[in-house]
């Protein structure tokens, strides 16, 4: 499999405090790649760098073989059109209904007629089990529903890469599993590459192909789940042991 | 080149059916509808279809549903396992209309009734809120429990001190322009000295308090509304309640006190600066001596003018605060709700200030 994302020697700082310290990793086409680590270790920061929302101090990030660091806005938009992002809190536009939120990318970036767009929206909302909430205002949704609506928006255009920032956080185990199953289905049916920031061990076990483990801004480990489970790195052992339910 | 064509009454798909050609596919089928309608069965051959996305599946489903209306049964044949799986996974054929039922639209009478009920509800809420603020405004003077320490100073600084430059500038210009427009007429009648009567009385009784109130409604009323609306939407007010704190006492009282103190002081400041604008026209354009201006002002101004100015400013301060808090607390629906609350508070506060100004103008006439 070819690399679809390549991060090399990525360094970033906030107010002189080093957040990411020389991160190097590759994400391969059609894999589920998990960004793992304790709170405040820089997981979301890494994700935001990859999608060009933050600029690093130094280093290189290539997405679809194009350098993202220092890229022109128009070129970045071309890359982002092929990506979907599920933010930690959904980031739905509160003034719009669920339907209108999911319609944004379809209406703005395709030449599809309204009838077909509606059908796609219905399918996507059905996939995230939000069919009955289509015409609700987003302010009427619960936290879990917001996240699922945001996922429907993120996959509206069948992106080649789907970034998910804590997709299971705040969801009940059944919905969480349903989301994981959907991610796997998207990977299988649409050859999607999925990059997930998560803490949820159950979810990691269900979906992970490969993992990067971040600690204090450094990538302590990059490899498969099995390799991670057998790793002798103390921090990783602790992470998987403490979170395990005996 | 299109990746679909007709062969022996069968629609053959090749390469890909994705978001890039889904619409073209539907148009292709529509264009060949007369041929398709010659038979009750129609096949879409997907043997050579390598890639299909959810838009492609939706397009096929739309064709199937459309042809069903002409009693034509459509089947996708020879699809690879992968394409078949996609057709199943992203199918919209089984989604019942009921699931996506739109909320029923209300009729004209129902909408009118809703508006009436909402209006009554808002009036009731406004009265309760005003009573609540009045009660805690007085009670809070005697008991500081449940109030945030130091917040009054911060709010006084924000509402009062920071507004000094803009209030000063606008008042000066109002006084200056008012005098300039009147000066020509007065000079025609040789009544130059009456510019003092005009500017002193109009600034203290009317323009000073009114302009200060309008500036503060736009500046501080909007800030109060948006801050409280954001706090409401992000559940900060609920968090305060769960800590056994009254949001009116904790959040609103410091703003109310700051407004109550700042508004009269700013109004007196506006009166003085506005008169200074008139003074400038008096001594330059109308050639009055400074002593004559001051002497005349001391003669024409009475205590009632000052009291009118201060009483008005107190009333305006309370109106602006109550309206700002009202719109903040009634906000709902995220960022849009905050915007609506802010706009509503400014428009309503200015309207109420002008109505109150008219009523007070009659009372103190």
Image (tube, helix red, strand yellow):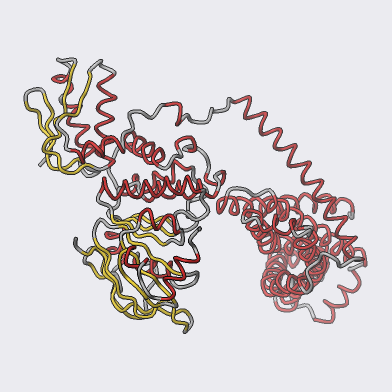
- Depth check: give the residue in front, A173 or B204: A173
Residue B213 as seen in the image, left or right of residue A21: right
For the N terminus of chain B, the quadrant is: top left
Residue B205, quarter of picture: bottom right
Residue at the image point whose x is 92% and y is 67% from the top: B302
User: Residue lying furthest front in this view?
Assistant: A246
**Count of residue discs:** 0
Is A18 above or below relative to A192?
Answer: below
Residue at the image point whose x is 77% and y is 54% from the top: B322
Is A208 above or below relative to B5?
Answer: below
- Depth check: give the residue in front, B216 or A79: A79
Residue at the image point whose x is 22% and y is 36% from the top: B84
Residue A48 as seen in the image, left or right of residue A93: left
Residue B206, quarter of picture: bottom right
Place of residue B44 in the rendered image (x, y in percent of width and height, measured from the top left): 16, 29
Place of residue A22 in the rendered image (x, y in percent of width and height, measured from the top left): 34, 80
Residue at the image point whose x is 22% and y is 64% from the top: A3
Place of residue B279 in the rendered image (x, y in percent of width and height, measured from the top left): 76, 75
User: Residue lying furthest left in this view?
Assistant: B8
Please indicate, yes or no, whether residue A147 appears anywhere in the rendered image. yes
Place of residue A170 in the rendered image (x, y in percent of width and height, measured from the top left): 53, 53
For the C terminus of chain B, the quadrant is: bottom right
Please indicate, yes or no, whether residue B190 appears anywhere in the rendered image. no
Is B238 above or below relative to B149?
Answer: above
- Depth check: give the residue in front, B128 or A82: A82
């Amino acid at each position: 499999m070819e690399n679809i994302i390549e991060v090399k020697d990525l360094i970033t700082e906030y107010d002189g405090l080093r957040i990411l310290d020389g991160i190097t990793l590759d994400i391969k086409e059609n894999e589920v790649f998990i960004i793992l680590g304790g709170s405040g270790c820089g997981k979301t920061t890494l994700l935001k760098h990859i999608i060009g929302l933050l600029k690093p101090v130094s280093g290189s990030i290539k997405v679809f073989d194009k350098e993202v660091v220092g890229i022109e806005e128009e070129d970045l938009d071309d890359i982002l059109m092929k990506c979907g992002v599920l933010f930690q809190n959904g980031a739905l536009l509160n003034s719009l209904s669920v339907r209108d939120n999911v319609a944004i990318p379809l209406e703005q970036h395709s030449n599809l007629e309204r009838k077909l767009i509606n059908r796609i929206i219905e399918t996507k909302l059905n996939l995230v089990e939000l069919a009955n909430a289509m015409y609700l205002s987003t302010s009427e949704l619960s936290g879990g529903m917001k996240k699922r609506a945001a996922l429907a928006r993120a996959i509206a255009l069948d992106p080649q890469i789907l970034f998910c920032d804590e997709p299971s956080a705040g969801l009940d185990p059944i919905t969480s599993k349903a989301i994981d199953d959907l991610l796997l289905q998207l990977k299988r049916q649409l050859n999607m590459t999925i990059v997930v920031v998560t803490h949820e061990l159950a979810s990691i076990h269900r979906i992970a192909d490969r993992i990067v483990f971040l600690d204090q801004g450094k990538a302590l480990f990059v490899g498969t789940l099995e390799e991670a489970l057998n790793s002798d790195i103390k921090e990783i052992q602790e992470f998987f042991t403490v979170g395990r339910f005996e | 080149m299109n990746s679909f064509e007709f062969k022996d009454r069968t629609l053959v798909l090749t390469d890909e059916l994705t978001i890039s050609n889904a619409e073209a596919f539907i148009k292709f089928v529509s264009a060949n509808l007369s041929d398709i309608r010659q038979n009750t069965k129609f096949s879409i051959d997907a043997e050579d279809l390598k890639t299909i996305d959810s838009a492609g599946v939706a397009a096929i489903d739309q064709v199937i549903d459309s042809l069903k209306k002409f009693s034509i049964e459509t089947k996708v044949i020879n699809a690879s396992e992968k394409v078949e799986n996609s057709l199943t996974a992203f199918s919209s054929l089984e989604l019942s209309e009921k699931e996506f039922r739109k909320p029923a639209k209300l009729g004209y009478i129902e909408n009118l009734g809703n508006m009436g009920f909402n209006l009554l509800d808002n009036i009731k809420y406004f009265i309760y809120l005003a009573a609540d603020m009045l009660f805690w405004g007085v009670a809070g003077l005697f008991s500081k429990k449940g109030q945030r320490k130091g917040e009054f100073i911060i709010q006084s600084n924000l509402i009062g001190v920071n507004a000094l430059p803009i209030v000063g500038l606008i008042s000066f210009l109002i006084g200056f322009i008012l005098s300039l427009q009147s000066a020509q007429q007065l000079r025609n009648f040789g009544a130059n000295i009456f510019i003092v009567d005009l500017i002193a009385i109009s600034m203290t009784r009317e323009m000073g308090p009114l302009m200060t109130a309008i500036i503060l409604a736009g500046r501080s009323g909007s800030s109060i509304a948006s801050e409280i609306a954001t706090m409401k939407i992000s559940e900060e007010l609920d968090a305060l309640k769960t800590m056994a704190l009254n949001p009116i006492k904790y959040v609103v009282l410091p703003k109310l006190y700051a407004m109550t103190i700042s508004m009269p002081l700013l109004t007196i400041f506006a009166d003085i600066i506005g008169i200074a604008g008139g003074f400038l026209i008096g001594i330059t354009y109308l050639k009055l001596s400074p002593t004559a201006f001051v002497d005349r002002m001391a003669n024409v101004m009475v205590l009632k003018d000052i009291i009118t100015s201060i009483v008005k400013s107190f009333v305006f301060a309370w109106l602006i605060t109550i309206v700002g808090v009202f719109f903040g607390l009634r906000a709902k629906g995220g960022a849009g709700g905050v915007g609506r609350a802010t706009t509503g508070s400014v428009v309503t506060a200015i309207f109420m200030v002008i109505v109150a100004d008219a009523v007070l103008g009659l009372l103190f006439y």
